[in-house]
Image (cartoon, rainbow, N blue to C red):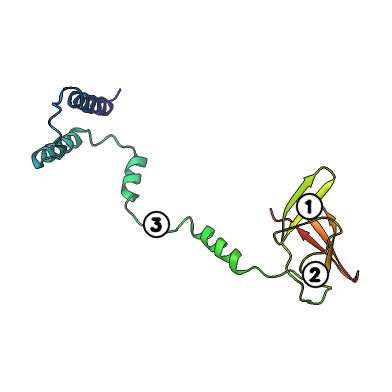
Amino acid sequence: MSKREKIILAVMTLAILFVLFEFLFSSPDNTNLMVTKTQLEGLRNGISSLALSLPAGNLSNTGVHIIDIAGDEWKRNPFKELLSQKSRVTTEITPLIEENETEINLPVYIYSGFLSMGEKKLAIINGLEYEAGHELETGGYIVQQIKPTEVLLKSKNEERTISITLPE
């Protein structure tokens, strides 16, 4: 055990003994827990004398380097990329349109849940539950097929089929 470790253990033992003595043998009428200036000054003197008594030359090169750079400002914020990715994702969302299709104003359908109760399968679309064959409230589309990860919607006039996937 090094000299530094022995000193630290001695200080810890003294602190524990002091706390035990105060807890067990202090008078119950002494309820003043305020620290006086002389007690505080004594504590500061004890800490500074302990710090001065520790050997100063036992730090490795790594320890010295860590102490030297501890107060420096960061040259590069390690979280900057994460913050910029988050803002990029929220600002760069664009609707996906297949190349061979022309842009058509379609209603927005959000597939947010899948329920399976025996043979009965339910899809939660825009917050409402639907079974296969039911017409969506927004109109124009009928639930054709329900899978755990996607729902197929078919337009009433049988021209168009839409696939809505469940987000992860």
Q: Which secondary structure, mark 2?
A: loop
Question: Viewer-proximal residue, 144 or 60?
Answer: 144
Q: Position of residue 75 (x, y in %)?
A: 41, 59
Q: Quadrant of residue 111?
A: bottom right
Q: Which secondary structure, mark 1?
A: strand
Question: Viewer-proximal residue, 65 or 124?
Answer: 124
Q: Which callout, 3 or 2, points to the residue nearer the camera?
A: 2
Q: Earlier in the sequence, mark 3 or mark 1?
A: 3
Q: CA distance from mark 3 to mark 2?
A: 56 Å
Q: Position of residue 74 (x, y in %)?
A: 39, 57
Q: Which residue extends farthest right?
A: 158
Q: Position of residue 58 (x, y in %)?
A: 28, 34
Question: Viewer-proximal residue, 124 or 96?
Answer: 124
Question: Viewer-proximal residue, 66 or 78?
Answer: 78
Q: Residue at x 36, y 57 (%)?
A: 73
Q: Quadrant of residue 77?
A: bottom left
Q: How many marks?
A: 3
Q: Position of residue 144 (x, y in %)?
A: 86, 59
Q: Quadrant of residue 95?
A: bottom right
The type of residue carrying mark 3 is Trp
The type of residue carrying mark 1 is Leu
Say which residue label 1 marks: 122
